[in-house]
Amino acid sequence: MALRSDNISTFIEIAQHLFRSTSLPGAGRNVAARVFERLRAPSDDEIRHGARYPACEWLDAALATVTAQSAEMGPVARAIKALEPQLGWSRRTSGSHGSPRYIEDHVHGMICGPGGAESRYDVQLGFSLMAPNTRYPDHSHPPEEAYVLLTPGEFRQQGGEWFDPGIGGGIHNAPHNVHAMRSGDTPFLAIWSLLT
């Protein structure tokens, strides 16, 4: 049986609370509930994606923004910071309509999922981080997912208008739903849960 570190357990507990918020669409709460049900059982193949990317340098600034926005969000910022040495990092290198430097200006921190702090393949729980004034490319994928926004930022789905769900709010992406996100004048940070 795999063991789970206290830092991962703390993050899961905080994230689960955030994904239960009525500020999220019901479908987002539902997919997250299924993710957290699977996460009740630790699982780890101990494969870590340890490479860091340029956008990782924005993490502290993003976490400071999270803490400044709301005292309620402080625990999630502290939990991410505590996990930083264990995270698996990745970034997208394809998609349309991304800003010119989006590859260098974004990164994903994997907490539970392939190559993450708890490397597993049945779910993904992590976060997206972007430098200021970055537009993530339009993309889609088969798994459905939910996001919770921790800093100011905007989302776009199915070619519609950009919208800001607000701090603590979020979105649900159905399977194959085309979506994107973008930051404003401050770094962007959002946590996500995804069924694989």
Image: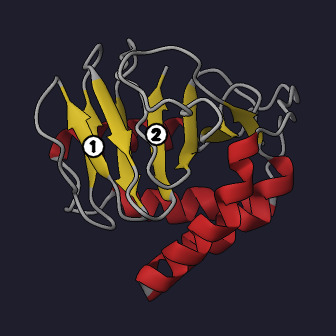
Residue at the image position 84 percent from the left and 48 percent from the top: 86
Looking at the picture, how far across and down is residue 173, in whole percent? 27, 30
The residue drawn where x is 37% and y is 57% is 184
Question: Are there few (<14), some (14-19), or many (20+) residues within 10 Å of tag 1?
Answer: many
In three-dimensional space, the C-alpha distance between marks 2 and 1, rounded to whole angstroms, equals 16 Å
- Is there any visible trace of residue 107 in the rendered image? yes
Q: Nearer the viewer, residue 155 or 9?
A: 155
The amino acid type found where label 1 is placed reads: Phe
Disc assigned to residue 193: 2
Ranked by sequence position, the earlier of labels 2 and 1 is: 1
Along the horizontal axis of the image, is 106 left or right of 86?
left
**Where residue 143 is drawn, which disc sits there?**
none
Q: Does residue 8 show up?
A: no
Q: Which residue is mark 1?
A: 155
> In what element is the residue under mark 1?
strand
- Characterize the local packing of mark 2: few (<14), some (14-19) or many (20 or more) Cα atoms within 10 angstroms: many
Nearer to me, 89 or 142: 89
Provide residue 32's location: percent of width, then percent of height.
Answer: 38, 42
Measured as percent of width and height from the top left, residue 17 is found at 42, 64
Label 2 is placed on what type of residue? Answer: Ser
Q: Residue at x 22, y 56 (%)?
A: 164
